[in-house]
Amino acid sequence: TTRSREIATPAAHGGRSCGEVMTSETKPCNDFACVVTAESKDCSLTQWSGWSDCSSHCGQGVQTRLRNIQVNASVGGLACSDLLEEARACEGLKECDVDDCAWGDWTGWTVCSQTCGGGVRSRNRSVAVHPTRGGAACEAQESIEEVEPCNTAACYETCIDGLWDNWEDWSDCSRSCGSGVSWRHRGMAIAASPCGEAVEGDASEVRRCEEGPCPGDKDCELTDWTEWGDCSATCDGIQSRARAIVVEGAGMGKLCG
């Protein structure tokens, strides 16, 4: 008679291999003496099959091979008592790659739980790569969720928008003659509450001002052009004309250059 068993858990992560263990065995039965006759036949077995592929491509694994009863014992012949299946550890396997735990990216922050007066918002993440083959686990103290306060400004019954005051008058020109600048300012008439809209625009403006020519300022003055002169050649020649400076530019006036 025969019985069999299977490998329930192959060795992993440096565990002990099952080795060349028996996964099937036979034993005699009805072992009282039989009358042997010319028709008696002993049990015989087939040849072993080839070794199976390894149960793992790295680390530790097992291979098995089988054989079967070819002829059962009959009429007092000898029964089979040899193994029908063998297992052995695989050889030459490389070490398995180790995968350490790795966190995925944080999600975006959730909407704040309050619009004012102090609320909270959160974000979370999950494990992107789980550890395998003895890899390092994610640190327990590393959080999968973060929470932070938001909208901490006090609440008001009415939101107040900011409002500018009226512009002040333009200042005197920065120069008493020639070109200068003047400016004006405005202040805040109403400051915006935390839930109101802030004012937009500048608090000051600048513009150019003209106060007339300063004493000593002179624009450049030129005479009229003379008539064109005779051509310098009967072909490919040039003509010229000229004018003279009557008054040189000075001060803030326009120069002749």
Image: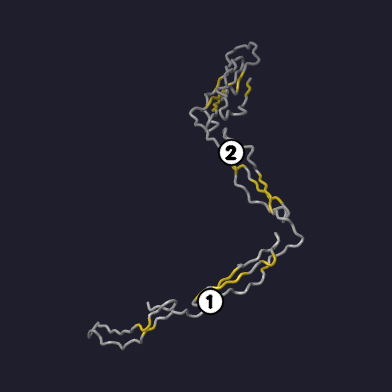
- Of the numbered discs 2 and 1, the one sitting upstream in the chain is 2
* Mark sitting on residue 101: 2
How many badges with numbers are in the image?
A: 2
Q: Position of residue 187 (x, y in %)?
A: 65, 67
Q: Position of residue 204 (x, y in %)?
A: 59, 69
The quadrant where residue 27 appears: top right
Residue position for label 1:
209
Colour setup of the view: secondary structure
Q: Tell me the amino acid under the disc marked 1.
A: Cys
Q: Position of residue 241 (x, y in %)?
A: 30, 85
Is residue 175 found left or right of 200 in the rendered image? Answer: left
Front residue (pair 2, 240): 240
The quadrant where residue 225 appears: bottom left
Tag 2 secondary structure: loop
Identify the residue at image location x=71%, y=51%: 119
Find the residue positioned furthest to the front: 215
Q: Residues within 10 Å of mark 2 (few under 14, many from 20)?
A: some
Q: Is residue 81 shown above or below 114?
A: above
Tag 1 secondary structure: strand
Identify the residue at image location x=61%, y=19%: 26
